[in-house]
Amino acid sequence: MSRAKTRHGGLVAWGFAAPALLVYLGFLVYPALNSLWFSFTDWDGLSAGYNVVGLDNYTTMVDDPVVAQAAVNNLIWAVVTVVAPVLLGLALAVVLNGKVRGKPVLRLIFYTPAVLPLVSVASIWGWLYNPQYGAINAFLRAIGLDGLAQPWLGQDSTALGATMVAAIWLRVGFPMLLYLAALQSISADLYEAATVDGASRWQQFWHITMPGLRPAHYVVIALSVIESFKVFDLIYAMTYGGPGTATQVMGTWMYFNVFQYNQAGYGTAIAVVITVVAIAVSIPYVRSQTKEHAV
Amino acid sequence: MNDSALSRRRFLTLTGGATLAAGLAACTGTGGDSAGAPAGGSGNGSKDLRLFTYEDNTTIGLLKEQVKQFDAQNGANTTVDSLPGSGAAVYPDKLRTELLGGKGPDVWRIWGGQIGAPFVKAKQAMDLSPYYQKYGWDSKINQAAVAGMTFDGVKGGMPFVALGIGAWYNKATWSKAGVTTPPKSYAELEEVNAKLVAAGITPLGTGGKYGWHVMRLFEYLLEVSAGPELHDKLLAGAESWDRPEVVTAFTNFKKWQDQKWMPEGAIGLDPADVELWYVQGKSAYTITGPWTEAAAIQSAEKKSADYGVFQLPTGHEPARHSGFVEGYMINARAGNPDLAAALLDFLNQPATVKALKVTASVVTGAEPDQATLPLSYEWSQGPGKQPFYTIQDQAFPKKEADQYFAIQSDVLQGKAGPADAARKMQDVVKAWKR
């Protein structure tokens, strides 16, 4: 191919990419860099003026007990709401991939929570957890386990766990769907051959299913981890970060500072930290995807 | 903005990390040129206005109807937008986002005190002093209410309502517990609570999600133990919170939880749900304002006669209750502030106020209608005439209010004792005043 042709091809490619690039620059890069800038200021989020305070917002974070609490909550949230939905989603996918009656209906039932608006999910679980009139405590009392009935969202010791249960319920459908799709791509011949060779169901799962799901694992786990670090809405709607600050996570604490405490500079500094962590976590996923496409 | 060597423009020029940017955008909400030049309102001299409020379904129709009349009289075209049911915890955020996004309303409704203050401090709301003069608002409007919309000497808002908080109760639940008359002292209130619990009824319907609803109980208990003068000084940070009167208030607060005088796990309950319990008979009473008659009792198609209201007894003179002011502000960048001010003046005319079924107007001649809102009328003619102390989520800035709510939460969960709580509260107030 001649040099002129190559150059022409390059220009055409840039031409096609330009609209998306402009949107990306205008709606992602520019606002993001603006946010980064505000993290070095004491902007209150409303006034026209502000002062540049260097790294003060970042050093303040070190002494902020709520940041420490939020970081720990984020970590717990990340582990629990990634591991549990992924394992449950995998289990459901494997079961639903087999010979089960009413398979389409079951798939729909398990995936439905994932499409519900988060505010509805928060309301549903808020009612279920109501200490006096909620279905959970009513059930526990009905089966004689009165001692286990708790004010689930009204005490520090159970509030975060209670919101995580709602999150697991909400998120289990997504990995299930991805795993189901991936399971369809594993050849049935492999299972037939393994059966002829006398492999047990467990051996088939471990040596055929799991390796076959490897690309899906990357996607499911990476996206779940990123999602978990960005958690905001469910916590905000279910507990508002409370009781006290017991269920604050970095996302909600950022929000409170930016939008409620008139500390937009400090809040955006928290956002920068969340972003850096999310990017660090997503690197393996991005690399794996890049490698895959390069092959 | 100071003359820093590194300006925002220079910074933006120097930085170009697209990868980092993508992630940042996903996690942050601020941006654009909002800090530099917030915009909003209609164009210069425009007859178009936008009014932003938090009226719910029971009153938004009435407001729109009145605004339509104003438009007809003034050749204006006013759009009314509402964010109902969000409360002071959410509505100001939405307003702030609109203002920063350049689509701010010309006129907005807002609470007074520390909730409205940031909008005036940030010069997003205009100084209404010229319009106070033009329309004679100082002489027409209750002065205590004007004070609630004056921020560091700037008349940043026009008060619209001055609402008092009292105990609204369900007569059937009281009868079931053998209670015939409202309590006259705090000791009698405790006796009423005990009788209600004995009859299997939760006395006070309150929920601590967001903090402010349970706060209504604590501030009452503080008024009881500290009395009016000390209470006011505590709210202003002029006296230390680390004192016996505050410890007593926290001790009583915990007692209400331990004696089951408030719902189990109250701290995690949504006030929007729990406040209605007294209408449904699930609790005996709640602590709220006169709006509850139209918004809760009558909208549930219940009769006002089956409910009652009384001022929570403090044992002090003057007998005060919690109260707050709500009003309207005008966008500092409104294209036609004169028209916006005319709208405000129209909204505070007694005839308009009556048509809006406002139960706690700040202008005379606009008392609630006795026939349609008998309880609100009763309140306005009795306790409503008494002075009030500033409701605590307006007395403190939001950050300090949240810290205070966290302390309340710790007390109710037994994680902090009353004396600890008083000390922690003093730390919060001290840091705020520093």
Image (cartoon, grey):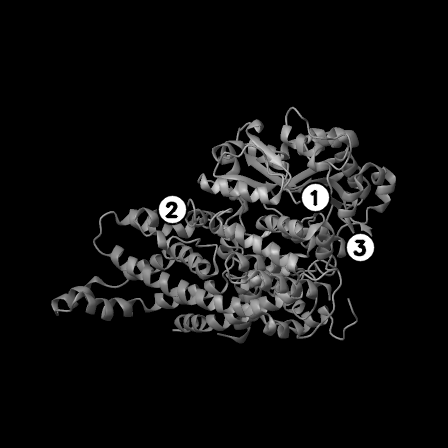
Quadrant (top left/top right/bottom left/bottom right) for the C terminus of chain A: bottom left
Q: Amino acid at mark 1?
A: Arg
Residue picked out by circle 1: B320
**Do the residues at discs 3 and 1 belong to one chain?**
yes
Quick one: B135 or A171, which is closer to the camera?
A: B135
Judged left or right of residue B395, residue A69 is left
Image coordinates of residue B276 in percent, x first then y, are 53, 39
Give SS at disc 3.
Answer: loop
The answer to whether B159 is drawn above or below residue A202 in the figure is: above
Image coordinates of residue A6 in percent, x first then y, are 52, 72
Give SS at disc 2.
Answer: helix
Image coordinates of residue B422 in percent, x first then y, are 62, 61
Quick one: A137 or B218, which is closer to the camera?
A: B218
What's the CA distance linking mark 2 and mark 1? 40 Å
Q: Amino acid at mark 2?
A: Ala
Residue picked out by circle 2: A135
Give SS at disc 1.
Answer: loop
The answer to whether A49 is drawn above or below residue A281 in the figure is: above
Residue B152 marker: 3
Q: Quadrant of residue B419?
A: bottom right
CB under 8 Å between discs 3 and 2 = no
